[in-house]
Amino acid sequence: MAVPDAPDYFRIGTVDSHSRARTGIINTPHGPIHTPAFIPVGTKATVKSVLPESMAALGAQAILANAYHLYLQPGADIIDEAGGLGRFMNWPGPTFTDSGGFQVLSLGVGFKKVLAMKVEEQPDDVIAQGRDRLAQVDDDGVTFKSHLDGSMHRFTPEVSMQVQAQLGADIMFAFDELTTLMNTRGYQVDSLERTRRWAERCVKEHSRLADERADKPRQALFGVIQGAQHEDLRRKAAQDLAAMEFSGFGIGGALQKDSLAEILGWVVDELPDNKPRHLLGIGEPDDLFVAIASGADTFDCVSPSRVARNSAVFHHRGRFNLLASAHRRSFEPIDANCDCYTCTHYTRAYLHHTFKAKEMVAATLATIHNERFIVRLVDDIRRSIEHNELPAFREEFMGAYYGAGQAATSP
C-alpha cells in the first residue's frame, strides 16, 4: 500500500480556538514527529559543522536532506547499500528528502533563493546575470548539468522517486517545477499543469517502488503545491493534489513574505484536515508564527545554520552578530535564557575570538545555538497551542524579539 492509513499516520491533537494552528503527531517508521515541528536541514546528510548526536541533543525531531546533492555525491545507491539515509549519517530519528527539483531548477539558472525555468516555446527565459543556463525543462522532466563537474543528468518524476526510494527517507516529496514571481501568468499556468502531471507520475512510481521494496520501511509521499501568488492557481493546485494518493502536502514555490498568511489560507482551505502540511523553506521567527497560525504543521529552512556560519546568532531580544567588537570582552552566554550546550558552556568572548581567528569550532557552536533556538521556539509554540495561549505567547515573544511596535503589527 503506497499511502499510510491517514488516522494512524497523522493524528490531530489540540486545535487552537483563535486560528488554524493545531498540534499533532506524524507517525513514521523511525519514530513520531510532534507537530508543529521545525525540521533542520542537513543538505548533504549533515547539518553543516554539527554532529547528528548534537542535533538530537538540542531537540531536533527529524532532519531533511536533499535528493539532488546526494544523487550527485556520494550517489543514492551507496546510501541505499548503507541501510538508508538515517543509518548512513548516524541519525536515529525520522528523515525527510526533498525531490531535488529546487536545486535542479535554481542552480540551473544561476539563482539560489530565486527560481526560474524555461520551455523553449515560452518567453520566460529568466536567468541570473552573468550565469549560463545549466538546466532545460520539458514536459517529461529536466535535463541538467552538474554544478560539481559539468556532467549531464536527467531527472524525471520517476527518477526522483527512484533516487528518494534509495535514500530511504521517511517522508519524500513529489518532483515539481518551480517558477519565479518574474514568470508570466501564462507560464505559471503551463507550469502548474506540468507539475500536476508529474505528481500523478510520482504517485504511480512511488506505489510501484513500495511494492518492489516491500522489505524496506514504508516511505510517505507528499505532493508539492505551486501557483506563486495567484489565488486561483494555488487553489487549483491544492484541489488537484488533494484528489491524489498523497500522505501529506508540501507548500512551496515563489511567494512574497507579506503574502504568506493569505497564500496559506487559500491552500489550507482546499486541503484535507487529516493530512500534514509542510511549508518548504521557512525559518524566521515571525514567519513561523504566521505559518503555524495559518495551519502549517512542519517547516524546514537552512537559515539557522547558514547565518550561524556568518557569526549571526539568535537572542530572545533579536538577532545580533558575534563579530561585533562589543563582544570581545563579554563573558556572558549568547542568550542567558537559552539552555543549549553552547550557552551553558561558552561565552560571547570565546565565540568572538573563534570567529575572528576563523576557527571551525565557531560555526559548530553558533549553529548548535541557532538550531536549538528555533527548535525550542516551535516547541514553545506547540505548548502554547495545547494550553490555548498562542496569542499571548506570540505577543510576548514578538514584543521582545522584534520590539513592541512589531508585536502590535505582526499578523
Image: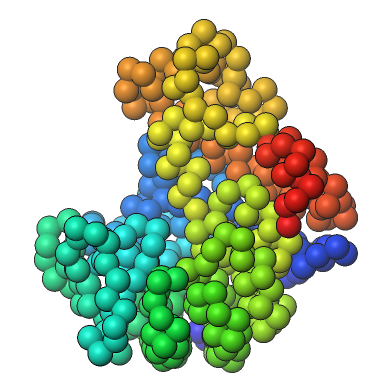
* Quarter of the view holding residue 81: bottom left
Determine if residue 28 is in view.
Answer: no
Give the residue drawn at x 67%, y 22%. Answer: 336
Instruction: Choose top left, top right, bottom left or bottom right for residue 278.
Output: bottom right
Q: Nearer the viewer, residue 248 or 405?
A: 405
Left or right of 317, for residue 113 = left
Q: Residue at x 59, y 86 (%)?
A: 232
Q: Is residue 249 shown to the viewer in this render?
A: yes
State whether residue 381 is above or below residue 234: above
**Location of residue 323 in the rendering, given as x and y in whole percent from the top left corner:** 44, 22
Q: Residue furthest top?
A: 329
Left or right for 224, reference 21? left
Q: 31 or 405: nearer the eye? A: 405
Above/below status of 9 relative to 199: above
Where is 355 relative to 250, above or below?
above
Identity of the residue drawn at 38% across and 53% down: 43
- Kindly indicate the quadrant of the structure image that contains residue 290: bottom right
Q: Is residue 355 above or below residue 94?
A: above
Q: Quadrant of the C terminus?
A: bottom right
Tell me what residue is drawn at x 38 percent, y 47 percent.
46
**Figure coloring:** rainbow
- Nearest the viewer among 23 and 2 is 23
> In screen coordinates, is 51 left or right of 6?
left
Q: Position of residue 126 (x, y in %)?
A: 30, 71
Q: Position of residue 338 (x, y in %)?
A: 65, 29
Q: How many marks?
A: 0
